[in-house]
């Protein structure tokens, strides 16, 4: 049982909480910018530093390998790749990483003539990526196709896709999600009947809202009339993606101004597919459309700019909904809710902290698991507000016994893996939220 060591028989006074409309700067979610790198060229890290967006925790790095169409990647180029990933790591940017041989729409002509050389490149780059896996958010694509988007390539048959996917997984290890371009490609890589939640492979979509099929991302036939290894219609593919991204990240680029991209329809689909990340500059026509539309929902977001609403809800968005004290044990109960489009995909920790006149402090750490904070779900956690035995041992400056007075009780959230803070959508962008005051005299 989690306990906070406070005097018995005190009273707890709640502090009113409000929901902020700020776009919280939290890890593993949100808008991203695209940066393109040619590994045969020196890196200008000073220029790169000044181009980073402080309000974005994600970046996409497109690594062009066109100079290695007929040879292995040079040691110098691999060193640049490692230096680049270390740079992003040092600036707390998680990388959406994609390798490609082409960025001009000429994938078929730019890629190596043999799949064995592609596999060699995957193994070489994968060894570097594996060493810096903590800073790689996910891998997009399997190196082939125009812009690395897995179309216009000679390596898209089921057998060759499986060769490339197996090589990629072995090269980068088990920690990093791998995303392919279409649901059909995902099914080609999995035995018939595999449930999306059973795999560590996900999807990225750079044709989002571009047409009824998202520019070829989906097919046109209903699932009941189509085979496993065929594209399905939009409705059926979206249901398929819903299960796929309960545990894995989904995102890409929104394009065009088709009916599918109207604000209301787009937000509904973002919730269904559990959208985590989106390009912040492409496509301008789509983003401008959302900027001009108003969100007509309930609560603090009603009447706000549609683009702001989307940006704030990419990925997870956590807030404290209620706080109460119950029972003879003076149990403090906290109710959190995820109002974002997607779940929080890693284990987190809620830290409940007690302060007395700014000089006494103690805390309890409560584990929060991804299943607890799926979109829209309420999560209830608790700890006991007092114990008969004074303050815990080992905390310098603490009295031997809990004293009378006012105790301020705060909560803050962090990612367990690396202790990075996760801002709550209560009040301003501060590390902690005041829950209430415990008084005893």
Image (tube, rainbow, N blue to C red):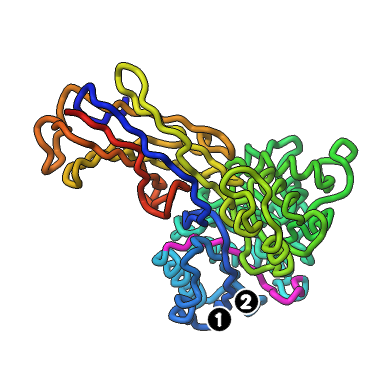
Q: Is residue 97 magenta?
A: yes
Q: Residue 381 placed where, x, y %?
A: 41, 30
Question: Relative to residue 205, is residue 195 depicted above or below?
Answer: above
Question: Relative to residue 119, is residue 343 depicted above or below?
Answer: above
Q: Residue at x 29, y 40 (%)?
A: 353
| Apparent side of residue 87 relative to residue 107 in the rendered image (left or right) | left
| Apparent side of residue 235 relative to residue 270 in the rendered image (left or right) | right
Asked whether residue 176 appears in the rendered view, the answer is: yes
- Residue under pointer 1: 40
In which quarter of the view is residue 38 placed? bottom right
- Residue under pointer 2: 68
| Apparent side of residue 314 relative to residue 110 in the rendered image (left or right) | left
Q: Residue 436 placed where, x, y %?
A: 33, 37
Please report contact status of discs 2 and 1: CB closer than 8 Å, yes or no.
Answer: yes
State the extent of the magenta-drawn residues as a range.
Answer: 92-107
Q: Residue 207 placed where, x, y %?
A: 75, 60
């Amino acid at each position: 049982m989690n306990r906070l060591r406070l005097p018995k028989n005190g009273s707890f006074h709640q502090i009113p909480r409000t929901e902020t409309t700020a776009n919280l700067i939290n890890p593993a979610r949100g808008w991203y910018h695209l940066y393109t790198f040619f590994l045969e060229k020196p890196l200008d890290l000073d220029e790169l530093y000044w181009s980073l967006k402080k309000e974005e925790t994600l970046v996409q790095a497109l690594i062009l390998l066109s100079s290695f169409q007929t040879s292995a990647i040079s040691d110098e180029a691999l060193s640049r790749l490692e230096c680049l990933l270390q740079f992003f790591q040092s600036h707390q940017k998680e990388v959406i990483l994609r390798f490609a041989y082409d960025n001009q729409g000429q994938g078929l002509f730019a890629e190596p003539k043999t799949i064995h050389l592609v596999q060699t490149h995957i193994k070489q780059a994968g060894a570097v990526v594996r060493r810096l896996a903590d800073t790689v958010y996910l891998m997009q694509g399997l190196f082939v196709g125009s812009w690395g988007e897995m179309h216009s390539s000679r390596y898209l048959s089921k057998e060759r896709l499986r060769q490339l996917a197996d090589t990629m997984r072995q090269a980068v290890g088990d920690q990093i999600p791998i995303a392919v371009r279409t649901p059909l490609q995902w099914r080609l890589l999995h035995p018939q009947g595999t449930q999306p939640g059973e795999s560590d492979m996900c999807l990225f979509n750079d044709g989002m809202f571009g047409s009824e099929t998202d520019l070829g991302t989906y097919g046109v036939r209903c699932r009941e009339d189509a085979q496993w290894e065929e594209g399905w219609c939009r409705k059926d593919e979206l249901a398929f993606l819903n299960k796929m991204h309960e545990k894995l990240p989904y995102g890409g680029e929104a394009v065009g101004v088709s009916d599918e991209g109207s604000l209301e329809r787009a937000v509904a689909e973002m919730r269904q597919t559990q959208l985590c990340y989106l390009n912040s500059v492409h496509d301008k026509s789509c983003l401008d459309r959302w900027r001009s539309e108003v969100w007509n929902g309930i609560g603090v977001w009603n009447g706000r700019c549609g683009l702001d609403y989307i940006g704030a809800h990419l990925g997870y968005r956590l807030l404290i909904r209620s706080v109460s004290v119950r029972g003879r044990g003076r149990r403090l109960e906290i109710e959190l809710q995820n109002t974002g489009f997607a779940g929080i995909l890693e284990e987190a920790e809620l830290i409940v902290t007690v302060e007395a006149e700014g000089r006494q402090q103690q805390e309890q750490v409560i584990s929060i698991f991804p299943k607890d904070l799926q979109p829209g779900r309420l999560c209830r956690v608790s700890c006991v507000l007092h114990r008969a035995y004074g303050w815990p041992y080992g905390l310098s400056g603490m009295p031997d016994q809990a004293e009378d007075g006012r105790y301020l009780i705060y909560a803050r959230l962090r990612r367990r893996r690396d202790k990075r803070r996760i801002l709550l959508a209560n009040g301003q962008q501060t590390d902690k939220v005041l829950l209430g005051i415990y008084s005893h005299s």
